[in-house]
Image: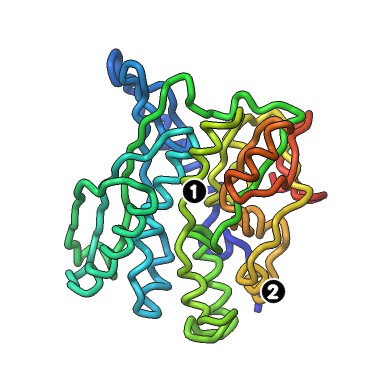
Amino acid sequence: MPKLDYAKAGVDIREEERAIKSLARVIKHVRKGFGKPILTSHYAGVIDCGDFGIAITTDGVGSKILVAEAINKFDTIGIDCVAMNVNDLVAVGAEPLAMVDYIAIEKPDERIMAEIAKGLEEGCRIANITLLGGETATLPEIIRGFDLAGTAIGVVEKDKIVTGERVEPGDVIVAIPSSGIHSNGLTLARKVVEMAGMSYHDKFNGKTIGEELLTPTRIYMEVLDVLKRCDVHGLAHITGSGLLKLKRLRGDVKYVVDKPLEPQKIFRLIQELGEVDEDEMYRTFNMGMGFMIVLPEDEAGKAVKLCDGSVVGYVEKGEGVYVKDLRLD
C-alpha cells in the first residue's frame, strides 16, 4: 500500500486554508453598535451585548458519518455534533447555552433520525445546553445519505474572553486526554482501513474498528472550572490540523510538546497500516490530546487536578509547533 497522508486521502489542509481566505476576503460588512463583533476568526466568534458577549460557532460531524453508515450505527454521532460546537465555545472562555441542528438527508428514515436524536440528547445533557430546534432538509438531488451539523451559542464576560494573546514564554501546556479519534481526520483513517483491505467489522481493541472510530468526541465542560479557578492564558480545541491548532493562540512564540500523552491504539493502527509519518499524524489527529490549556507554571498543578490533565509541554521564545524534535508547521 502506498504511503498515505491527509492530502493524498483527499483533504489538503493548506488548500482548504487558501479557499477560506478567498471567502473571507469578500465578506467585509461589519455591524456597528449593539451586537458588533468583538472576536472573529477564532474557535468561536463573539458579539458585544453590553456587559457580556454572546459567542457563536458552527460545525459538523464530517465523514465520521460514513463510518456510521458502514456499520449501521447512528446513536452516538449526535454527541459528536454537540461536542464539536460546544468545545469551540469553551475554547474562547464561553459557557455553552443552546444549539440548533441541521440535517440534510437524501431520504427521510425514522429509525436513523431517532438514533441521531439519542446522541444529540446525550450531548446536550453532558454540556448542559438546550437544543432549541433546527432544520431538516430532504435533498435527493444533492445529498447521498445524510449530513449532520449544528450551531451553538454561549455567554462570556467581555473581560474574560480567552484569545491566547496572553500566552508568553515560560507558560506550560496542559493536555486533557481525548476519547479517541473524535471527529477529525476520518477521511485519512477511512482511506487507510479501506486500502489495507480491512473491514469496519473487523475486531480491534475489544470492539470492531468501526465502533472504535465512532467513539464519541469528548465534551470538555471541566475546562469551565479551570477558567474560574486558574489564570488561563490560552485554550486550544485540538481538531482538524491537529496540534497546529496551538497557532490559533499567539503565533509569535514556540510551542514545545516534549511529553505528549500516549495516543490510543487506533492512532498507531492507522499510522502503521498507512505508513503515515509521525509529524503527519500530529498535523492531522489529536493523538490522544483533545484539548490544551496554556497557563503559568505555578497554576499548572491546580489545573491538572481540575481537568484530568497532564503537563505535556511549554512555551518559549521562537516560533513554530514542535512535538519533541519534530516541527509540525
Q: Which mark is residue 271?
A: none
Classify 107 as above or below 203. above
Q: Residue at x 58, y 44 (%)?
A: 306
Badge 2 marks a residue whose secondary structure is: helix
Tell me where residue 289 appears, x and y as whole percent: 62, 53
Nearer to the camera, 279 or 83 = 83
Q: Residue at x 39, y 80 (%)?
A: 71
Q: Quadrant of residue 252?
A: top right
Q: Residue at x 48, y 81 (%)?
A: 200
Left or right placement of residue 14 versus residue 257 in this view: left
Q: Are marks 1 and 2 in contact (CB under 8 Å)?
A: no
Tell me where residue 263 appears, x and y as whole percent: 66, 63
Tell me where residue 51 appears, x and y as whole percent: 35, 17
User: Which image quarter is the N terminus in?
Assistant: bottom right
Mark 1 crowd level (few <14, some 14–19, many ≥20, 10 Å Cα): many
Label 1, label 2: how far apart the Cα atoms are: 29 Å
Badge 1 marks a residue whose secondary structure is: loop
Nearer to the camera, 95 or 38 = 95
Tell me where residue 82 appears, x and y as whole percent: 37, 52
The amino acid sitting under disc 1 is Tyr
User: In this figure, which residue is indicated by the disc labeled 2?
Assistant: 272
Give the residue at the far right of this rendering: 325
User: Which image quarter is the C terminus in?
Assistant: top right
The amino acid sitting under disc 2 is Glu
Disc with the residue nearer the chain's start (1 vs 2): 1
Left or right placement of residue 170 versus residue 212 in this view: right
Q: Which mark is residue 220?
A: 1
